[in-house]
Amino acid sequence: MEKFLRQKFHFKKSFYIVFPISSLTAFGIYMGRFLRYNSWDILQNPIVLFDDILLIIINPIGHFEAWLFTISFTIFLFIGFLLFKVLKKAN
């Protein structure tokens, strides 16, 4: 994915796009793992899904675990991305 982004954008811009993608991925993992949503729920129950997403965004204190997981897993994914990047460069 990063290779595709680098073809379309400058290296620094592609690097800054990876972090928000990591954040959205982490939030998606939270939604699937803890709220038990699946990919087809966006078609079957979009109102309920977007309502839950909106509640998490509007009331961050009431959904502390969602934010904690999302931030922690974002950092984990981004560090993993950087490690793979360094390992690839070393080879």
Image (cartoon, grey):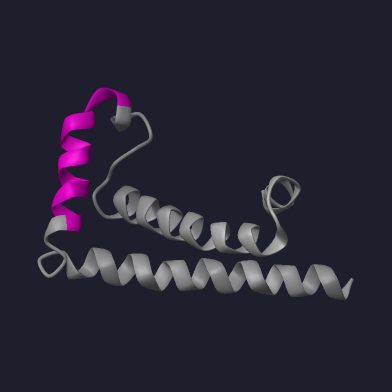
Does residue 43 lie above or below 36 as drawn?
Answer: above
Task: Specify the farthest residue to the top.
Answer: 44
Q: Is residue 32 magenta?
A: no
Whole-percent x, y for residue 78 in the image: 55, 69
Image-based side of 40 in relation to 11, left or right: left
Image-based side of 45 in relation to 39, left or right: left
Task: Specify the farthest residue to the right.
Answer: 91
The part of the chain drawn in magenta is: 43-57
Q: What is the quadrant of residue 34 in the picture?
A: bottom left
Does residue 86 lie above or below 14 as drawn?
Answer: below
Whole-percent x, y for residue 17 in the image: 55, 57
Q: Which secondary structure is most common in the magenta stretch? A: helix
Front residue of 49/19: it is: 19
Task: Specify the farthest residue to the front.
Answer: 10
Residue at the location (45% across, 67% down)? 74
Q: Is residue 44 magenta?
A: yes
Does residue 33 lie above or below 42 as drawn?
Answer: below
Residue at the location (81% across, 67% down)? 88
Whole-percent x, y for residue 75 in the image: 47, 73
Residue at the location (12% across, 70% down)? 61
Whole-percent x, y for residue 42 in the image: 31, 31
